[in-house]
Image: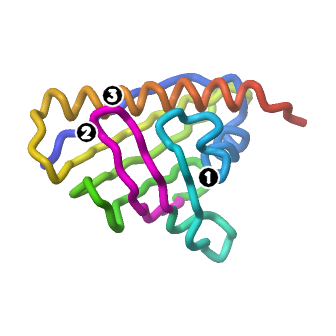
Amino acid sequence: MAEHTSSTITIEAAPADVMGVIADFDRYPEWTGEVKEAEVLAKDEQGRAEKVRLVLDAGAIKDDHTLAYTWTGDHEVSWTLVKSQMLRAIDGSYALAPLGDGSRTEVTYRLTVDVKIPMLGMIKRKAEKVIIDRALAGLKKRVESVPRG
């Protein structure tokens, strides 16, 4: 079984506001750093992205790939690889948990990446950790800077 990397952050916003930013793929290049392009290729019956093409530049991992998204209720989204130039697999998820009165959210990001080229596990996990930490920091900054109400 592949090892995954995960990290958790607390965001000063309701889960719906956090998920709103996560689901807005067109704006990923504005706040993620690693995602240079994002294009929603297919949507489900609720209008949520089902298939998304992403151009990624995360240092050791550079790729143009397509991911399939699965939405579980209003508090979780996961993804798996459809096609890629460099990756053999990429599985990840965001899980949101409301805190206190629901005005704060704990966000857990899990990621497993398998590349087609040989790469030491330690280097791969470091790249995963960089992707996760930057994504969570960017998500927090983006959500907390967007006016709500």
Residue 4 x, y percent position in the rendering: 25, 39
Local crowd size for mark 2, using a 10 Å CA cut-off: few (<14), some (14–19), many (≥20): some
Residue on which disc 1 sits: 25
Q: Earlier in the sequence, mark 2 or mark 3?
A: 2
Residues at circles 2 and 3 in contact by the CB criterion of under 8 Å: no
Q: How many marks?
A: 3
Give, as a single range, the part of the protein colored magenta: 53-71
Q: For the residue carrying disc 3, how many other residues have a C-alpha within 10 Å: few (<14), some (14-19), or many (20+)?
A: some
Camera-side residue: 43 or 30? 30
Q: Is residue 22 left or right of residue 61?
A: right
On residue 4, the disc is 2
Of the residues under marks 2 and 1, which one precedes in the sequence? 2
Q: Say which residue label 3 marks.
A: 129
Left or right: residue 85 versus residue 58 is: left
Give amino acid for label 2: His
Query: Relative to 6, is 28 above or below?
Result: below
Mark 1 residue type: Phe
